[in-house]
Amino acid sequence: MKSKSCFFRFLSLGLGLITLALPLSCGPESKGKPSDTGPVAARYAGGELSIQHGMEVFNRHCASCHNFQASEIGPNLSGVTSQVDKAWLVAYIQDPKAMIDGGDPRAAALFERYRMYMPGFPHLQGEDMEHLLGFIHKFSEAEKRNTSNRTGGLVNPIPQPIPEAGLALELEEWFTAPPTATEPLLARINKLDGIGGRLFLADQRGILYEINGDTVHSYLDLKAKTPAFIDTPGFGSGLGSFAFHPAFEANGLLYTTHTEKAGSARADFALPDSIPAALQWVLTEWQATDPGKATFAGSRREVLRADMTSQIHGFQELTFNPLAQPSDPDYGLLYLGIGDGGAALGGHPELCDNSRHIWGSVIRIDPGGRSSANGQYGIPEGNPFLGQEGALGEIWARGFRNPHRMTWDRGGSHQMFISNIGQHSVEEINLGRAGADYGWPVREGTFLFDVHANSELVYPLDKPDTLFTGPALQYDHDEGNAVSGGYAYRGMRVPELQGWYLFGDIPRGTLFGAQVAEMDGKDPATVYRVALRIDGEATTLAARSLHPRVDLRFAQDASGELYLFTKNDGKVYRVAGAKKP
């Protein structure tokens, strides 16, 4: 049997002259969707989960000898999917000796150069082969866009596998949200939250439900009350988030975000005239005439509106600090996470990571004030950029690609956690700090990112980074695709979870955890993989899913108890316990 070293060396011969690129989006899953670029008419697998699987195959068998920018132990893999057809690659990988002995000119030239036979890999068939080649093709196309000619890109930036936590989360299926479509995604449920003893659930197709026992009823049909509302083309559009004012039971105030067509109204945060808008995100205040009623009745007013360069990475989490008391300066102030709108890789990185523009930031506003430029909200005195020339006073922190979720530890640390969905390499959880810069689009996790290089790769930093605030947790894309932010557990039902921050991966539905005490913001703490049992059976959310993309989300009630839910099938689960697997 060949040694591992020889195995990789021979494989490097067979995969010679291939380039890689991996755009893993957080948009709707398109597993199996072919891509058809380059002069060779080949149909390569696309979609985040199939490409992700291809990366895993590559990292198992190819990565120790190959990169996509230089010939090292094995040849540079750049360009092969544009130079030879797919059938040749499949045949060579599976039986290179037969092709060399049969006189294939390209195979013979590789043998002449390396003077050795590569062993065949007939076991790489079906999805393994399709996804491997899809991954290679994606990375190859991205390398063509490396106009900065940066080298040293990392396909597997965090090679250490995530260890097991020795902990299995016990879930109980609670209820299924009403379907708003006839096929997956059956219910685009995106956020579960509450006020007092009440719980509410949002479907991105425009309905805010209230949960009653094991059933739900429509509390606010936002789509019906907002004529310009749109929930297409997906990519997070529709009813984005909601937040009840901490004094809702007295003042009846509720806040929501939603999407409308570009140009629906004048934007408070408009793109420069030379940049077309794809759609608009709108923050709305609703005031219930009777906060205790089962169905909303009352008035609404628009708070702010922003243009986006594309349909992705728009308004994300909308929330109040649950720890703030009426005497605290943070009480009643509204936080809103705003993604970069795809601007960084859409040709407009100048819109990101600066205090002049709202995109790629977390803003903090006083919805009861009127000191803003549009007169519809206030800018809190404690905001870090207030009063700085040329800066937006609304910005609380910046340097995010997609600040998807924001939560607070209700226990000892009282830390704020901000999950930031990465491009194609690193997912991260950050500790929220006023005025902090988390680095996008020149950082992804603890690595360098270059919008002018291969956008599917990150690069090592030349020296320790003192310019930006690093992540508290991170994992890379052979472990997941897009981080689903979670909560520090401080409930009473599951004592085994005390002190754990629980989170996961949106597309795959994988569960992760970390010790809050280790999340000090100095270096990334250890991420652990958490097992799962549902109704007493060891399983995974992916195994129970109706669709390859799980679409996992986390929630917490006023008592600190945790819930998980999955968008593809509308299932909502209670966290009922935890034990060793």
Image (tube, helix red, strand yellow):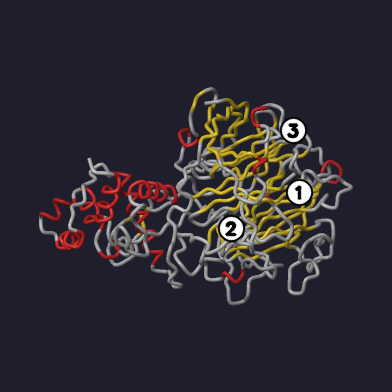
Q: Is residue 425 left or right of residue 79?
A: right
How packed mark 1 is, by other alpha carbons closer than 10 Å (few <14, some 14-19, many 20 or more), is many
Residue at image mark 1: 320
**Secondary structure of residue under mark 2:** loop
Q: Is residue 101 left or right of residue 118?
A: left
User: Closer to the N terminus: mark 3 or mark 1?
Assistant: 1
Outermost residue to the bottom: 274
Residue 563 at x, y percent in the picture: 63, 35
- Asked if residue 41 is positioned above or below residue 515 in the image, the reply reads below
Say the numbered circle drawn on residue 348.
none
Q: Amino acid at mark 1?
A: Phe
Q: Amino acid at mark 2?
A: His
Residue 283 at x, y percent in the picture: 71, 57
Report the front residue among 561 and 457: 457
Q: Amino acid at mark 3?
A: Ser
Residue at image mark 2: 313
Compute the Cα span from label 3 to label 1. Answer: 16 Å
Front: mark 3 or 2: 3
